[in-house]
Image (spheres, helix red, strand yellow):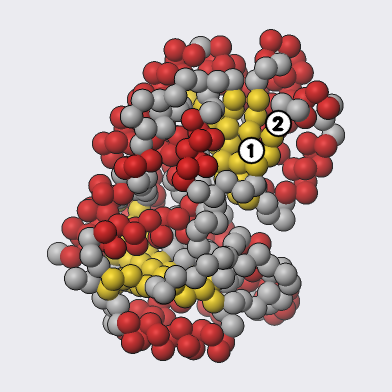
Amino acid sequence: MSKFLLISHIFPPAIDGGSKVINKLGHFFEQQNHQTLYLSSNCSTTDDFIKSNPKISPKILPNQIKLPVYHQLRLPLKIINLFLPPKLYFYGLLKIFQKGPVFKLIPFLKATLKITKFNPDFIIAGPLPTTTILYAKFFHKITKAKLLINASFHQTDQDFFATPLIKTLQKTDYLWTLTQYETDYFIKKIHINPNKIIFAGNGVDPRFIIKKPKKTTNNILFIGNLSAHKRVDFLIKTFFNLIFQNPKYKSVRLTIVGQKTLFYPKINKIYQSFPSNIKKQIKFKFNVITTKQLTKEIDQCQFLVLPSIQESFGLVLIESWARGKPVITTNIPPLQELVTKSNGGLTFKIDNQDNLQKQLTKLLDHPKLCQQLGKNGLNYVKNNYTWPIVGQKIWKKISS
């Protein structure tokens, strides 16, 4: 039996792929009779790192440590960085701490004592570019445990390239990658030793997988946090044009399932500008957190749309396929790779409204194509991306 310390920036039921990955792997090891201890902030979203009145994550279990954070540090750290050369290591360090979470000192010291007594054999942490990697590095040094990082790497986001983060990736014992694209990028561009890499992807609980997909309805679904890079604003504008130009789609609905962020008011402003008849065809849902609620939303849709311009994997894609539903997503490399390998959906060019509208009409007008793509995705997930498959790949590597 081994002991695992699992570190993430926030903790489910927050809708966040990076924290969910760490949490789910921890559950896999618990099922294998290993001991786990979870460390995270007590916040529900990354926006809560800078709010004076953050949403606090409910219910703390005995094997969880949820630490309070300093909420007003981002601006002072940005001001200090104005006077530092960007190539300086300390500049990169402050840039990471601007992202947060920055744990309050006394609770952090108490957590350190508890973690030291726990004496983990392995530390699993993610995602970048949050401070979780730096905390993991600290506990790695004081406990001598093996360190496994899940970067959830966004190659188009410059915050991921802060020098302290890259150096930590290069020195980690193991690096868990989600796609072949990410794997190749780490080896060729970040110069990671290939022997450290565990290309395991992401996973779903086998119980999440449906035996027989439900009948399709004229409902388009989005799942994810409502951040700017998810492009929900772009999605609802495209949906508006689709309905406005084609009266035959007046029965089609768009459901946005997500978590509010600081970007949400901009999305809401666009939504409120629509005519009332079209607003009735768009529904926002903010408290879908349980597996039962999530599967119900997916089962009620015809297909899922992910218009994001930054993703390391796209967990919602395999969740949709696990319920036998096809997807439409952007052609960024990680998402394109999943769609190509699974043949479970369609892709479109980033922020190209005409291209997305074309793909929407293709699936809305061809239910048999929808059914076949959903079936392809379902088989792909069952064979590659359940947690027993992903967890065994990781355990085989780190236990050898």
Question: Could you tell me the amino acid type at mark 1?
Answer: Ile
- Helix, strand or loop at label 2? It is strand
Question: Could you tell me the amino acid type at mark 2?
Answer: Ile
Residue 226 lies, with reference to residue 162, above or below; the image says above
Say whether residue 265 is left or right of residue 138.
right
What numbered label is drawn on residue 90?
none
- Helix, strand or loop at label 1? It is strand
Residue 254 lies, with reference to residue 165, above or below; the image says above
Picture quadrant of residue 249: top right
Foreground of the two, 211 or 102:
211
Picture quadrant of residue 76: bottom right
Which residue is at 35% across, 46% downward?
205
Foreground of the two, 34 or 192:
34
- In this view, which residue lies farthest toward the left? 400
- Real-space CA distance between mark 1 and mark 2, rounded to the nearest whole angstrom: 8 Å
Which residue is at 33% across, 29% downward?
211
Crowd class of label 2 (few under 14; some 14 to 19; many from 20; radius 10 Å): some
- Disc 2 target residue: 282
Q: Are marks 1 and 2 in contact (CB under 8 Å)?
A: yes
Looking at marks 1 and 2 on the same chain, the residue that comes earlier in the sequence is marked by: 1
What numbered label is drawn on residue 256?
1
Q: Let me know if residue 337 appears in the view.
A: no
Residue 133 in the image: state x and y as whole percent: 45, 70
Q: Quadrant of the C terminus?
A: bottom left
